[in-house]
Amino acid sequence: MLGLPKSTEFNKRIPKQKFYDNLNVSPALKRSFIDQIKVIYWANKIAASTVNLAEGKDVTEIEVFEVKLNIPTLDEAVLKQIDREIPYHILFILEYENQFQAWIGYKEAAGSGTAAFKVNKYYHTEWMLEDELPIKLEGLNIQTVYENFVRQIAGEALQSSQTESLKESVERDKQAEGLQKQIDKLQTKIRQEKQLNRQMQMNAELKDLRKSLEALE
């Protein structure tokens, strides 16, 4: 899969109930696993033992999970649950009727609690043919391979200067996303507002938000 080296192939089927057979999973999340997922394969393992690359400081392995779907959508909470259960970084390849999506979470070490990592944000491609997925094994160690996977999948959302770290790019993208939500909400309020002076006040606020968003792009 993805043209990865044969040495990385793992091809182990994982029972999906492994991820929801515990008391902490809500009935709704369990239903998403049952209804939306057909089967999960642990397709590849990218590690120092399978490729000629050193471990990274924070990323020692990347697992590639192929998730075959019953429907062309998957609840993001399903991916979060899998990420909680697996103490490594994961590249998800969703498949539905010979179309593919790549998903990956920006995963950081958890500051506290029992989880090894926390996912701050997921990025994904559109549906496309497998050989069109923009994923290439690039980097001098496992960490840079992972960071390149995130940037390849995120595309324009994480385009940045070469001096900006992946963490900084993700934080900037989250800020931009938050500003866009504020802009959309304010635009709705402006359309509904009847008083001209209040419209003018909100338009000034909207102008400031757009300037802040442009500064991040």
Image: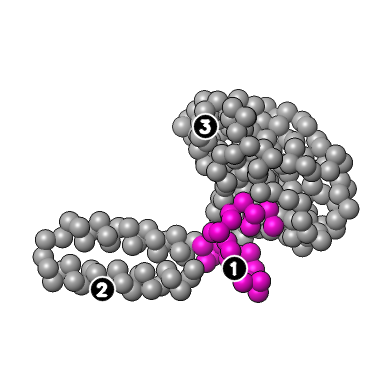
**Towards the viewer: 21 or 28:** 28
Q: Main secondary structure of the magenta part?
A: helix
Tell me the crowding category of disc 3: few under 14, some 14 to 19, or many 20 or more residues within 10 angstroms, Cα based. Answer: some
Q: Secondary structure at mark 1?
A: loop
**Residue at horizontal 37 percent and vertical 58 percent from the top:** 181
The quadrant of the image that shows the N terminus is top right
The amino acid type, in three-letter code, at marker 3 is Pro
**Residue at horizontal 68 percent and vertical 53 percent from the top:** 149
Please say if 175 is above or below 132: below
First-in-chain label (3 vs 1): 3
Q: Secondary structure at mark 3?
A: loop
Q: Which residues are magenta?
A: 148-173
Q: Evaluate whether residue 51 shows in this view.
A: yes
Marks 2 and 3 in Cβ contact (< 8 Å) = no
180 is within the stretch colored magenta: no
Q: Position of residue 147 (x, y in %)?
A: 69, 58
- Residue ID for mark 2: 204
- Residue ID for mark 3: 72
45 sits to left or right of 118: right
- Residue ID for mark 1: 160
